[in-house]
Amino acid sequence: MEPEVRAADERLRSWLRRAGRSAAPSKNYGATKAPIDDDDDDAAHLAGMQQVEEEETIARRVARRCRRVMCLLLSGVAIMLFITMMAAGYVAINDSDEIAFVTLGDWGCGPDNCRVPPTAPEGFHHGGSHQLSVAHKMAKAAEEISSKFVLALGDNFYWGGVNSDTDPLWKTVWLDRFSHESLQTPWYAILGNHDHYGNAEAQIDFSRKKLDCTHFKVCPSRWVLPRYWYSVVVPSDSKKFDVQFVFIDTVILAEGASMALAEEKMKSGLPPHLKPEDIDKWKKWAGQRKAMAKLQLEWFEHALNTSTADWLIVAGHYPVFSGGEHGNTPELQEQVLPLLKKYNVDAYLAGHDHTLQHLEDGGVHYFVSGSGALNGEYHPLPQSLFGTTQNGFMAHRIKQDSMEVQMINSQGEMVNKVVLRRKRNKGTQGSALENDLSAQVDSLGKRVEKKVFRIF
């Protein structure tokens, strides 16, 4: 084969190989000057070219297989990353769609203020140590559920409330005992009968002046008690649903309707800062107490009637129904119970009886969380679903369509769990006239509170 022909042949074969076409020899392709007559040389060349082609084919196959394996591996990694991101997103949505909090009632025992004589009922002994145990376990539960706030259901300071907004009990009973990081959240408080035995107005002033921060240097301020009765709407982080809490002063409501509680108050003895003439003056104000109860009921019904919240929860110190040592509160059954049913309230939270209870009546669920420091009695009622005299608290987790309530004792053990389904649908907000009326009622309430309750 002449050099020119061989060179042309090799160039053509190379081009065919790069183009992906067969490079098998042909007698005449590329032969422009003379026919191929060197058969041995051509056969040797053909064998060499076939070996090269086979090696290149094997290499291409290996490359294709490697590419397939890499694609499969990368696809698997991508799928795993997608699943992980979806799972993380799902957890985040769950967290943002949950309003968690804890409730604690009748917890007002510090290291010294709850001492009782040996003849006192067994449940009144060791209140300080019981309260401390409850505080530790409540802090742990609050951390686990990412609690956003605490509901303090009254009898915040035994036995006679506080004397002033700088009373040492603020520090020894509350600030020192509930210093855990998970409890450095708002404490929405209401007043109990023992708080009214002392200077109830001082607990309101403490909130208005933010004295836990400005006086006791525990910041930011946590105590929330702007007036004797008030309401708070708490939205979920995602803004997909909300909960309205309506806090009422059941001591005012009950005493305004009956003198029986007033007599009980006088029998318990006078706090040190009160004198007999103060009680005489208080008795003369019985008519104004009734007026205060009437005013609060008007505000209460207005708050329920104009609520547009997905969940509606009412909290008061006295229970409507209770199988505890004090039992039912007839005045609340007469005045409050019909409104709870009429306006489709989901739950009523209370203390007073030193127990943990769950009751149900007419579609409204009643929870008694009053064993934050002391132990009482329990005798089941027809409405009772659960009850215990163990010290403890409750942990609540509200989602868009369900509310879980756990009852936890001072050892940190869950003794009962309840899951409620939402029954309310969003309504429409009240008119401007209704909102203006609410502001007027609230303003009037503040003025009358100052006038009637300053001595307490």
Image: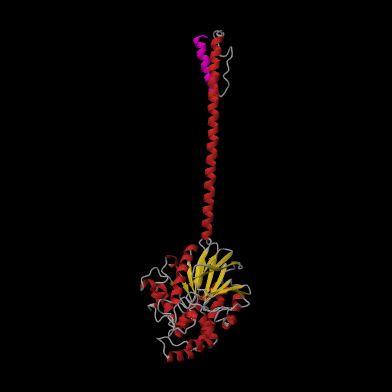
| The one of 380 and 260 positioned closer to us in this rendering | 380
* Whether residue 108 is visible: no
| The one of 197 and 285 positioned closer to us in this rendering | 197
| The one of 398 and 141 positioned closer to us in this rendering | 141
* Whether residue 99 is visible: yes
Q: How is the image coloured?
A: secondary structure
Residue 325: x and y in percent read: 54, 81
Which residues make up the magenta segment? 1-17
Horizontal placement of 306 versus 455: left or right? right
Horizontal placement of 331 versus 211: left or right? right
Residue 11 part of the magenta segment: yes
Which quarter of the figure is the C terminus placed in?
Answer: bottom left
Residue 97: x and y in percent read: 53, 61
Residue 367: x and y in percent read: 56, 73
Q: Predominant secondary structure in magenta?
A: helix
Q: How many marks?
A: 0
Q: Is residue 179 above or below residue 227?
A: above
Residue 428 part of the magenta segment: no
Residue 100: x and y in percent read: 51, 65
